[in-house]
Image (spheres, rainbow, N blue to C red):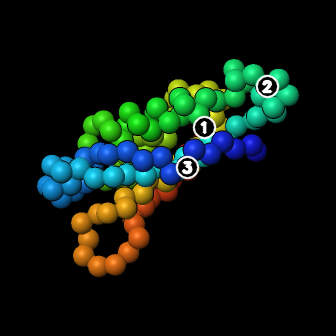
Amino acid sequence: MDKIHVNKIEFYGYHGVLPEETRLGQRFIVDLMVETDLKEAGLSDDIEQSISYVDLYQVCKEIVEGTPYKLIEAVAEKISDQILERFSKVLSVTVKVIKPNPPIPGHYESVAVEIKRSRL
Protein backbone atom coordinates (compact mmCIF):
# COMPACT_ATOMS: atom_id res chain seq x y z
CA MET A 1 0.00 0.00 0.00
CA ASP A 2 1.12 3.56 -0.69
CA LYS A 3 1.96 5.87 2.19
CA ILE A 4 1.97 9.56 3.00
CA HIS A 5 4.29 10.66 5.81
CA VAL A 6 4.16 13.93 7.72
CA ASN A 7 7.13 13.83 10.08
CA LYS A 8 8.39 15.67 13.14
CA ILE A 9 5.62 18.22 13.31
CA GLU A 10 5.90 20.25 16.50
CA PHE A 11 3.24 21.76 18.68
CA TYR A 12 2.90 23.22 22.15
CA GLY A 13 0.27 21.57 24.33
CA TYR A 14 -0.86 21.02 27.90
CA HIS A 15 -1.10 17.24 28.16
CA GLY A 16 0.14 15.32 31.16
CA VAL A 17 -0.63 13.75 34.48
CA LEU A 18 1.41 16.16 36.61
CA PRO A 19 0.01 19.59 37.49
CA GLU A 20 3.01 21.46 36.06
CA GLU A 21 2.49 19.79 32.67
CA THR A 22 -1.07 21.06 32.38
CA ARG A 23 -0.20 24.47 33.81
CA LEU A 24 3.07 25.23 31.99
CA GLY A 25 2.66 23.08 28.88
CA GLN A 26 5.43 21.60 26.77
CA ARG A 27 6.50 20.63 23.25
CA PHE A 28 5.01 17.62 21.51
CA ILE A 29 6.18 16.09 18.25
CA VAL A 30 3.96 14.02 15.98
CA ASP A 31 4.94 11.61 13.22
CA LEU A 32 2.02 10.66 11.02
CA MET A 33 1.77 7.99 8.33
CA VAL A 34 -1.38 7.23 6.37
CA GLU A 35 -1.86 4.33 4.01
CA THR A 36 -3.91 4.97 0.90
CA ASP A 37 -3.89 4.32 -2.84
CA LEU A 38 -1.87 7.05 -4.54
CA LYS A 39 -1.84 5.64 -8.07
CA GLU A 40 -4.54 7.94 -9.46
CA ALA A 41 -2.94 10.97 -7.81
CA GLY A 42 0.41 10.07 -9.38
CA LEU A 43 -1.08 9.53 -12.84
CA SER A 44 -3.35 12.58 -12.82
CA ASP A 45 -1.20 15.02 -10.82
CA ASP A 46 -4.47 16.07 -9.14
CA ILE A 47 -4.60 16.83 -5.40
CA GLU A 48 -8.23 15.69 -5.32
CA GLN A 49 -6.94 12.15 -5.90
CA SER A 50 -4.62 12.37 -2.87
CA ILE A 51 -4.83 13.60 0.71
CA SER A 52 -3.65 17.11 1.48
CA TYR A 53 -0.62 17.23 3.78
CA VAL A 54 -1.89 20.59 4.99
CA ASP A 55 -5.18 19.02 6.08
CA LEU A 56 -3.40 16.16 7.86
CA TYR A 57 -1.19 18.68 9.66
CA GLN A 58 -4.24 20.71 10.67
CA VAL A 59 -5.94 17.72 12.30
CA CYS A 60 -2.83 17.08 14.40
CA LYS A 61 -2.57 20.77 15.33
CA GLU A 62 -6.22 20.98 16.43
CA ILE A 63 -5.83 18.01 18.75
CA VAL A 64 -2.38 18.63 20.22
CA GLU A 65 -3.03 22.34 20.77
CA GLY A 66 -6.65 21.75 21.86
CA THR A 67 -8.24 19.93 24.77
CA PRO A 68 -5.66 18.72 27.31
CA TYR A 69 -5.42 14.98 27.95
CA LYS A 70 -3.57 13.21 30.73
CA LEU A 71 -1.96 10.64 28.44
CA ILE A 72 -0.22 10.95 25.10
CA GLU A 73 -1.95 7.65 24.35
CA ALA A 74 -5.23 9.60 24.32
CA VAL A 75 -3.72 12.28 22.07
CA ALA A 76 -2.61 9.62 19.57
CA GLU A 77 -6.02 7.94 19.68
CA LYS A 78 -7.85 11.22 19.02
CA ILE A 79 -5.59 12.01 16.07
CA SER A 80 -6.11 8.58 14.53
CA ASP A 81 -9.90 8.77 15.08
CA GLN A 82 -10.13 12.15 13.36
CA ILE A 83 -7.91 11.14 10.42
CA LEU A 84 -10.06 8.06 9.73
CA GLU A 85 -13.27 10.05 10.18
CA ARG A 86 -12.34 13.02 7.98
CA PHE A 87 -10.46 11.30 5.15
CA SER A 88 -12.36 8.46 3.51
CA LYS A 89 -9.37 7.57 1.31
CA VAL A 90 -7.23 6.67 4.34
CA LEU A 91 -7.15 2.91 4.87
CA SER A 92 -4.98 3.01 7.98
CA VAL A 93 -3.10 5.56 10.03
CA THR A 94 -0.04 5.29 12.25
CA VAL A 95 0.43 8.06 14.80
CA LYS A 96 3.51 8.54 16.95
CA VAL A 97 3.31 11.19 19.68
CA ILE A 98 6.66 12.14 21.17
CA LYS A 99 7.12 14.01 24.43
CA PRO A 100 10.71 15.28 24.24
CA ASN A 101 10.97 16.78 27.73
CA PRO A 102 8.66 15.08 30.21
CA PRO A 103 9.38 15.81 33.88
CA ILE A 104 11.19 12.53 34.52
CA PRO A 105 14.53 12.61 36.36
CA GLY A 106 17.33 10.97 34.43
CA HIS A 107 18.91 10.96 30.98
CA TYR A 108 16.86 10.06 27.92
CA GLU A 109 16.01 11.52 24.55
CA SER A 110 12.22 11.39 24.79
CA VAL A 111 9.20 9.24 25.54
CA ALA A 112 6.67 8.29 22.89
CA VAL A 113 3.69 6.16 22.00
CA GLU A 114 2.88 4.84 18.56
CA ILE A 115 -0.46 3.40 17.48
CA LYS A 116 -1.85 2.06 14.23
CA ARG A 117 -5.56 2.09 13.46
CA SER A 118 -7.36 0.78 10.39
CA ARG A 119 -10.82 0.87 8.93
CA LEU A 120 -12.88 -2.17 9.92
SS at badge 2:
loop
Which residue is pictured at 39% across the width and 65% down the height? 111
Residue topped by disc 3: 7
Relative horizontal placement of residue 40, taking residue 87 as reference (left or right) = right
Q: Give whichever of discs 2 and 3 has the lower sequence position.
A: 3
SS at badge 3:
strand
Which residue is pictured at 32% across the width and 63% down the height? 101
Q: Give whichever of discs 1 and 3 has the lower sequence position.
A: 3
Q: Quadrant of residue 39?
A: top right
Q: How far is the residue under mark 1 from the one under mark 3?
A: 22 Å
Residue topped by disc 1: 119
Q: How far is the residue under mark 2 from the one under mark 1?
A: 26 Å
Q: Which amino acid type corresponds to the residue marked 1 in the rendered image?
A: Arg
Q: Estimate how packed mark 1 is, as few (under 14), some (14 to 19) or many (20 or more) residues with alpha carbons within 10 Å.
A: few
Q: Quadrant of residue 79?
A: top left
Q: Are marks 1 and 3 in contact (CB under 8 Å)?
A: no
Q: How far is the residue under mark 2 from the one under mark 3?
A: 23 Å
Q: Which amino acid type corresponds to the residue marked 3 in the rendered image?
A: Asn
Residue 119: % across, % down = 60, 37
Residue 56: % across, % down = 53, 34
Which residue is pictured at 30% across the width and 36% down the height? 66
Q: Estimate how packed mark 3 is, as few (under 14), some (14 to 19) or many (20 or more) residues with alpha carbons within 10 Å.
A: few
Residue topped by disc 2: 45
**Quadrant in which the N terminus appears:** top right
Residue 118: % across, % down = 60, 42
Query: 58 and 78: which one is in front?
Result: 58
